[in-house]
Image (cartoon, rainbow, N blue to C red):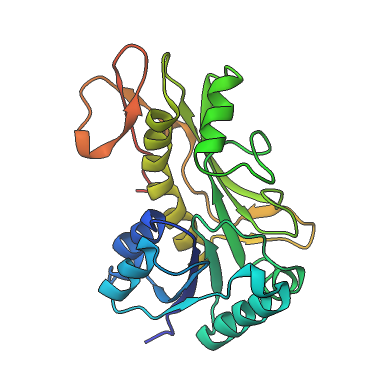
Amino acid sequence: MSEPFRVAVLASGSGSNFQAILDRLHQSPESPVRVVTLVASRPGIRAIERATSSGIPSVVLPDPKEGREAAAGRLGEALAEARADLVVLAGYLRLIPEEIVRAYWGRMINIHPALLPAFGGDGMYGRHVHEAVIDRGARISGVTVHFVDEAYDRGPIIAQWPVPVVEGDTPGELAARVLCVEHVILPAVVDAIARGHVELARSGMCVWNKPWFGGDRFVVEPDADPGSLAGSDESGARIRRPSTE
């Protein structure tokens, strides 16, 4: 039996993307992915409860007020102890120290709730992103998964998927629609990396060695199964989540 592909997940909040990875990959006998640790940026978050319920060890980083070196050192120790093949930032709000980025270059990814390079950067997280999208009058938002570099939301893009902004959307409504797509795309990218289908080339560009799924899978269906929905457009047509099958 081949060795499992070891994934460490970093989180700062509820951990719904962490849960999506657990549900779609970690708990699937067909998947090579096994989540080996959760690193939390602060104590008491829901992501820690999810890890405990699934029997996955968790580590809480020191408060930044204790000093950058302490937090960076503990993060490095946690990832080394986990022997992580891939580090996944799933709603993780701290900037990754440069020494950690270098150590895991091409093996650390992040998910962002907009179509980068738009609506990214320092301070652009969570509700702030969706508020900015609506305030600018954008008609399309979406999800981006990218490799991590030394700056917020700047690393090479791996995959993106569009999500419509509906007339009259509130930030909360848009966030819910985007989150549905996040829960599909992030596990799909983790699985693709684990299987060697995608990698970061020496050129600094993301290279897909095996086709993923194309735009023809993003379709609007008036009577789609509610379990497959990512949201609805102005006409009320329901939008099917992207499929990797």
Judge whether 228 appears above or below 85 on screen: above
Across and down, in percent, residue 240 comes to 32, 32
Let me know if residue 29 appears in the view.
Answer: yes
Let me know if residue 196 appears in the view.
Answer: no
Q: Residue at x 37, y 27 (%)?
A: 219
Residue sitting at the far right = 203
Q: Residue at x 26, y 38 (%)?
A: 228
Give the side of residue 135 with respect to residue 202, left or right: left
**Rendered-image quadrant of the N terminus:** bottom left
Residue toward you, 33 or 16: 16
- The count of marks equals 0
Q: Which quarter of the picture shows residue 149?
A: bottom right
Give the side of residue 96 with respect to residue 53, left or right: right
Residue toward you, 72 or 200: 72
Judge whether 232 appears above or below 175 on screen: above
Across and down, in percent, residue 127 comes to 50, 38
Give the side of residue 58 with respect to residue 125, left or right: left
Give the side of residue 124 with respect to residue 191, left or right: right
Judge whether 30 appears above or below 185 on screen: below
Across and down, in percent, residue 150 comes to 75, 59
Judge whether 55 appears above or below 169 on screen: below
Across and down, in percent, residue 12 comes to 49, 60
Q: Residue at x 62, y 60 (%)?
A: 94
